[in-house]
Image (spheres, grey):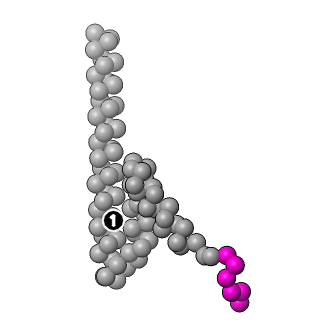
Amino acid sequence: MGLFVVRANMLTIKSLQRAKRIIKIVSAFTLLIVGAAMLVLPGPGILVIAVALAVLATEFMWARRLLDRIKSRARPKRGGRQS
């Protein structure tokens, strides 16, 4: 009986982890779509897209690369004009 309970608990934990991952991915893609809409509608579109990519970067390598590219473009360039 004890082995059955342990196995059932492991399956429950795996199911919860999978559900959390799916919820995280779906919510991040929803944020990405909302951010894309905010590029033409009023709102902080770039910021929302960056947050969505940050969430997706925890799961997907393509999102991490895209987020790194956005970060590098957002940083001020050194060696420019000083005011």
Is the N terminus in the top left, top right, bottom left or bottom right quadrant?
top left
- Residue at 62%, 76% (x, y): give it: 77
- Residue at 61%, 76% (x, y): give it: 76
Question: In this figure, which residue is indicated by the disc labeled 1?
Answer: 32
Instruction: From the top left corner, tell me how far across and down residue 52 is, in percent.
Output: 39, 61
Instruction: From the top left corner, tell me how far across and down residue 45 is, in percent.
Output: 38, 75
- Local SS, label 1: helix
Give the amino acid type for the residue marked by disc 1 in the picture.
Leu
Q: Is residue 77 left or right of residue 27?
A: right
Number of marks in picture: 1
Instruction: From the top left corner, tell me how far across and down residue 46 is, in percent.
Output: 42, 73
- Mark 1, other Cα within 10 Å: few <14 / some 14–19 / many ≥20: many
Is the C terminus in the top left, top right, bottom left or bottom right quadrant?
bottom right
Instruction: Answer whether residue 24 is magenta in the image.
Output: no
Q: Nearer the viewer, residue 79 or 52?
A: 79
Q: Nearer the viewer, residue 54 or 24?
A: 54
- Residue at 31%, 19% (x, y): give it: 7
Instruction: From the top left corner, tell me how far across and down residue 32 is, in percent.
Output: 33, 65
Give the overall secondary structure of the magenta segment.
loop
Q: Residue furthest top?
A: 1
- Residue at 34%, 71% (x, y): give it: 35
Q: Is residue 56 left or right of residue 70?
A: left
Which stretch appears magenta? Answer: 78-83
